[in-house]
Amino acid sequence: MSVQVQFLEARLAVISVPLEHYSHVFHGIARLALGTWKAIRTGDSEHTRDRDNFRHDYCDFEEDLSDYFHNISITPTECSIICREDLIQPVFGDEYLSSLKNVAVLPRRYMAIKVDAAGVSSGNERILTLSSSLSAAGIPIFFMSTYFSDYLLVPTDVKEKVRDLLEKNNFVFSSLENSYIALQNRSDSSSTSSLILNDDEDARLEGPTADNKPLETYHLKPAFDQTELLITGPRSQSDLDLIEFAVLRILARRPCYFSITTYADEIALVLEKEDASLFPPDSLMGSQDELYIPVTLDLRQVPVDVVGVVAEVAAKLEGCKIPMSFLSTAMTSTVFITRENAEHAKRVCGTDFQY
């Protein structure tokens, strides 16, 4: 199994918008989702046509546009926006955001880490291993599993600490790939132990320690939701205008669950089942029969720098031996489990979860 870890250098801001203010930031969200924000730099008339009806203030960025990363997620708790720090003012307006009650721009800045692993059928091993290890090192993280790749967000001020953890645990930097690559464990080439970033290889499987049980400390109960979701993305040959129009229609109706993650030319989506019909036939990847159920945690009363919340939830669900995907936003953490495994997961988790 080949594992690559790539640092994306752009400084990212994390913004939490209460749902009652969603309409106030809708135009900015649409700019990010449709990519029309690029006109802020380029002034390209192609991006400023009447199709978006948005007015742009032009400015310039130091970084290349190929380095951009963003995520927009809607949950029953909030709308979470992760975007480049230098997009906040031209897209949303610092003063305007600060005028909206309970809209929070988290004080720290983050960088995205892209994780790719050939030969792994689901993202849970990659994300669980890395996130648990970083949490064990006291590093707060956000995370997301997409149809194409997995991403972790770490504070920019711990970048070197993360690099040190990788290098100490069998990762080497490849200038050719511009990534850290995990060396094979010769004694067991199929093992994921080369991904363990702390000294205790059993830490992930053991779950939270007696001193770090955030669910108990903050009286949190993960809740099973009955909403059926697809984890997908558009095919590369799809008509981008039609894809963007479908995304805009979804954003306009503000569903209970939606997520769009974009890096370079990669667009990944989490959709409610009924929203798939808004896209052109055969334009979405994967099977539309492979549905997921969200298990959510409302983190509005939890300090943002608390670590290990998701690791504790995942440790409980891991006993079910089922595939999982993950989405971490400013005030919500969500674990996606396959629909056919939901009842089994409920039996295993018992009264620790809400239903």
Image: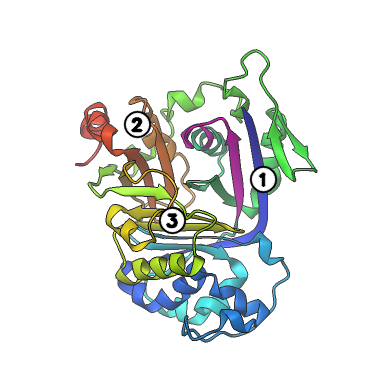
Q: Mark 2 is on which residue type?
A: Leu
Q: CA distance from mark 1 to mark 2?
A: 28 Å
Q: Is residue 336 magenta?
A: no
Q: Which mark is drawn over residue 6? A: 1
Residue mark closest to the camera, 1 vs 2: 1
Q: Quadrant of residue 62?
A: bottom right
Q: For the point 67% across and 49% down, which residue is it?
A: 7
The crowd level at tag 2 (other Cα within 10 Å; few <14, some 14-19, many 20+) is many
Q: For the point 54% across and 70% down, which residue is it?
A: 35
In the picture, the quarter occupied by the C terminus is top left
Q: Are marks 1 and 2 in contact (CB under 8 Å)?
A: no
Q: Quadrant of residue 294?
A: top left
In the picture, the quarter occupied by the N terminus is top right
Q: Of helix, strand and loop, which one carries label 2?
A: helix
| x, y percent for residue 287 | 38, 43
| x, y percent for residue 60 | 70, 77
Q: Which residue is mark 2?
A: 317
Q: Is residue 104 visible?
A: no
Task: Give the mark nearest the N terminus, 2 or 3.
Answer: 3
Task: Give the mark nearest the N terminus, 1 or 2.
Answer: 1
Relative side of 209 to 342, left or right = right
Relative side of 5 to 313, left or right = right
Q: Of helix, strand and loop, which one carries label 3?
A: loop
Relative side of 227 to 134, left or right = left
The residue segment tinted magenta is 111-126
Q: CA distance from mark 2 to mark 3?
A: 32 Å
